[in-house]
Amino acid sequence: MSQNTGLLQVFSRSGTSSSSQRSGQGPESFGIQMELLVPTRGFRIVDDQDRELKTIVEQIEYQHGVRIRLSGQEDPILISAASPKEAREAMSSILKSLVLREGHATVWQDSILIAPPRGDRRAVRILLQEGPGTTWFRPAAAPTGSGEVADALAVKAYKRNLTAAMVRVGDGLRYSPNRMRMRIGFGKLFFKERKKGTTSYTLDEFSKLARRVNNRGTSYMEMRLGGESMREQIQQAFSLDADFGDPQGKEDSVIVTVKNVNLEVSVDGTQDGRLTLGALNVFHREKSHRSVDLATACPDKKHDWVLKVESPIDETDSKLPLDQRTLNNGIKIRRNPNTNCIEPHIAASFAQTNHIEALIGKTTWSYFLNKEYIVEISLYQQWSTLSAGAKSQQPVAGVSVAMYRPEWSDSMAKADVSAGPRPWETFPKQFFDSSRSSTDPTTGLDPVAALLHWVGKVQTLLDTIV
């Protein structure tokens, strides 16, 4: 891994940090403050709720006699010290502790790509529009009379860059022994920053902005597309499309948000009609070094898409905040006869004792897409945890859409890589090659083009919904 110190920004000034004031230390003890901005690639994500990271920070504070304050993922780490030398030594220790080990930096990496607008909207500029109630920006295509055209070469370049990103990620994942899960998700990609005073870009200018945003980690993908009415509209649109038809399956699960993880438990039925919790999957709440997003911004569409690979936490780990037995004893589930969706319930005392922050009921409908992919529509109903004596709240609903192939689970299962990498073909061919059947419209296309065909199919359907 190349440690590019150009991504590191360090500032120093005199003063006293709030952490030193809280600890009773005065300006004479900590007269120097320095801010450390950790690069987003090749280093562990800085999360002020990460218990392991907090332990590391405490050790560095003790070792160097400094005070360290962690903030959000986009904020710098603040080091307060008695001298610049001690601050710099603490910075060095922090970076050494945060750097990802050999292989991780090449395996788990993100990319943001730009799909050039097509058809009669090729002559466009890219506009950054503020999201409602936020300063985050989303790209949108707008026609221009200047003759700026995203031509066929731009489309080929996007496809070439997407293929290269997939190959790069796949080459690293070959050596990962962990169980992984891969999904293609649909949402809206927002940027935190833009060129000062500029909201209108050419395709080339916007691509440069996307690269900068990617390096700094100042973007996020909003995966919730709407509420219950959006779910109904999507299902209605699917039922009218010959490539989808009626749902082929339905599954329920419960998600418990606690500390730094989401515990997702399937809901099983018993012979006497009771609902109980089944298999458990545990995922990091925030992005970790064991997840990767390859996101594509689509300015001429209402929805962008992302290829997401993540590695669940081993559910047998004794350090998990809650085990399956505890969850089963503390969560009661019933099915709402009006919506036919599950409604999990927990006592306020159970939530407080186990530091549960939110409880989510999830119902997923599955659709076959041309017998190649399964497209999932998931309805989430989230209840904020209740304190003792608080009134029950109505859940907040959200819907998401994801796509995957059933055979991916086998390829992504745990593997013994001690004797060599997973026996994969190139990543695109391994996962996205067409079926070659006579009825498959992607027959004859290369794997990435075949994937983009089906991604475009879902995007087009979603874009018909107002």
Image: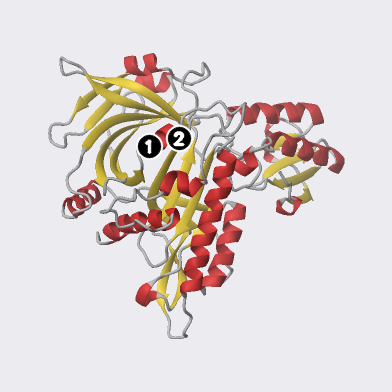
The location of residue 41, given as percent across then percent down, is 64, 47
- Residue wearing tag 1: 407
Quarter holding the N terminus is top right
Report the amino acid beneath label 2.
Answer: Ser
Q: Residue furthest left?
A: 338
Report the amino acid beneath label 1.
Answer: Glu
> Please, what secondary structure does the residue beneath circle 2 have?
helix
Residue, x 16% and y 34% (percent of image)?
Answer: 340
Residue 266 numbered mark, or none: none
Horizontal side of 360 relative to 26 (left or right) equals left
What crowding class fits label 2: few (fewer than 14 Cα within 10 Å), some (14-19), or many (20 or more)? Answer: some
**Observer able to see residue 244:** yes
Horizontal side of 6 relative to 111 (left or right) equals right
Total marks placed: 2
Callout 1–callout 2 Cβ contact below 8 Å: yes
Instruction: Depth check: give the residue in front, 228 or 103.
Output: 103
> Please, what secondary structure does the residue beneath circle 1 have?
loop
The location of residue 464, given as percent across then percent down, is 25, 62
- Quadrant position of residue 212: bottom right
Tell me the colour scheme of the image.
secondary structure
The image shows residue 376, relative to residue 345, as above or below, that is: below
- Quadrant position of residue 298: bottom left
The image shows residue 18, relative to residue 439, as above or below, that is: above
Residue, x 38% and y 37% (percent of image)?
Answer: 407
- Residue wearing tag 2: 411
- Quadrant position of residue 411: top left
The location of residue 403, given as percent across then percent down, is 35, 45
**Observer able to see residue 72:** no
Quarter holding the C terminus is bottom left
Instruction: Depth check: give the residue in front, 89 or 295.
Output: 295
The location of residue 247, given as percent across then percent down, is 20, 42
